[in-house]
Image (spheres, rainbow, N blue to C red):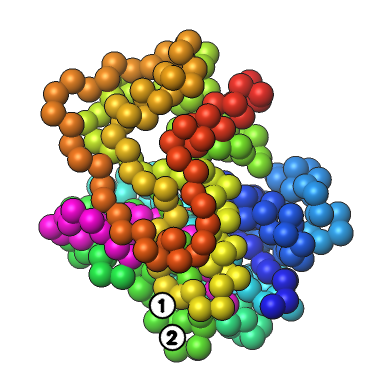
Amino acid sequence: MTNRIAIAGASGLVGANILKSALERGYVVRGAMRQPQKAAAVLENLPGAAERLTLFSANMDEAGAFDEAVEDVDGVFIACLIPVYRAPDGTPATELDDQRGFREIINPTVNGCLNIMRSAIRAGVRDIVICSSTSSTNPIPAVAVKNEVDHWSDADAQCAAKKYTSATKTVMEKAAMELAAAHGVRLRILLPTLMLGPMVLPAHGEEGFMGAIRRMLRGEKGRHDTAPNDSTSMAHVEDVAALFLAAYESPTAEGRYYAVKQSWHWNDIYRALGEIEPGMKLPQLFEGEQTTPTGFDFTRRDSLGVAMRGLPEILGDAVNWVKANM
Ligand SMILES: NC(=O)c1ccc[n+]([C@@H]2O[C@H](COP(=O)([O-])OP(=O)(O)OC[C@H]3O[C@@H](n4cnc5c(N)ncnc54)[C@H](OP(=O)(O)O)[C@@H]3O)[C@@H](O)[C@H]2O)c1
């Protein structure tokens, strides 16, 4: 196998980690995003970047914008399909009707993904790996143990509930699979949720739950006053990058793969954080009967051969990275 890849969204949390791991493995990488200048100083200083990384500016909203970035590569990773929570005029997605929900929330991401795929297909690429999300794998009614083959979210039900943002991933994956099938593309779709650990770009350590860990370490409120009676799935961000590259490198991998270690109740997450860093300002634990965390069938994920780190390692690496970058 040759080793020239393009990464759309190379400055993102996911994209930058794939980029770093790919450079470590000796890949030649073409990284694309709208504003490469914002991340260039960090990305171009990663080991191997001087010899093997080229950055490109490209906006997936424009057909053909990725033509140059995907020239002469063997595989394309798409990690720029970020959730859109508001219409361009600022209206929350949850307040739109179906017409606007599709036009302003769902279609831009679906069309952006297809624009990148079409650039890749025109360039002769037949290996594409997309970053989606576990939010596309929530069937109604819920199942005790879900898998990537049988279990899909119902986009119509999501739209009826005005969850246009969540529906986007479901609609996008199906459209990408259809385009891939029509052109003989071997498509892999990776499905992460929360990703924690060392960040390639410092800005990502300010966002999401990494930002909450930072605030709790400072003695401030993180995300919750009280742990919700709910669970979240998560993974070490470097394990997620390893899954992407394993899916790409596998001669047979195709279709959807979970990119999570497992799901934990928030009480267990906060208990583990308290053991790692007793001085943190943690929320009250939920008292009462705890809901059961989401169950996953990891047969397909495990077929990729990546050893996934557990909760103490995921949270420990996240805390240590934040402490070193306070
Ligand atoms: N972060 C999470 O916790 C999480 C959880 C589950 C799933 N995911 C999924 O993982 C994927 C990547 O998310 P992320 O968190 O890594 O995103 P991110 O950190 O916000 O990065 C997004 C990347 O895409 C680029 N980008 C955004 N809009 C673009 C456009 N129109 N054209 C070209 N490039 C564009 C951004 O650079 P520019 O702004 O310069 O264009 C950046 O490189 C998404 O599909 C997301 O749903 C993420």
Give residue 57's quadrant in the image: bottom right
Residue that appears at 40% across and 66% down: 300
Q: Residues within 10 Å of mark 2 (few under 14, many from 20)?
A: few
Q: Which amino acid lies under the numbered mark 1 shown in the image of this protein?
A: Met
Whether label 1 touches label 2, CB < 8 Å = yes
Query: In x, y percent, where is residue 178?
Result: 39, 81
**In the image: residue 201, left or right of residue 140:** right
Name the residue beneath numbered marker 2. Answer: 181
Query: In x, y percent, where is residue 147?
Result: 29, 63
In this view of the protein, can residue 101 be seen by the observer? no
Q: What kind of element bears circle 1?
A: helix
Q: Which amino acid lies under the numbered mark 2 shown in the image of this protein?
A: Ala
Whether disc 1's CB lies below 8 Å from ligand 1 is answered: no
Residue that appears at 66% across and 24% down: 324
Q: Residue furthest right?
A: 51
Q: Which residues, given as a range, are shown in magenta?
A: 127-148
Instruction: State which quarter of the image contains the C terminus.
Output: top right
Check residue 90 in the rendering and tell me which mark sits there, or answer none: none
Which of 84/302 is in front? 302
In this view of the protein, can residue 165 be seen by the observer? yes
Check residue 177 in the rendering and tell me which mark sits there, or answer none: 1
Give residue 121's quadrant in the image: bottom right
The verdict on residue 129 being magenta is: yes
Query: In x, y percent, where is residue 278?
Result: 46, 13
Query: In x, y percent, where is residue 55?
Result: 75, 59
**In the image: residue 197, left or right of residue 35:** left
Residue that appears at 25% across and 70% down: 150
Q: What kind of element bears circle 2?
A: helix
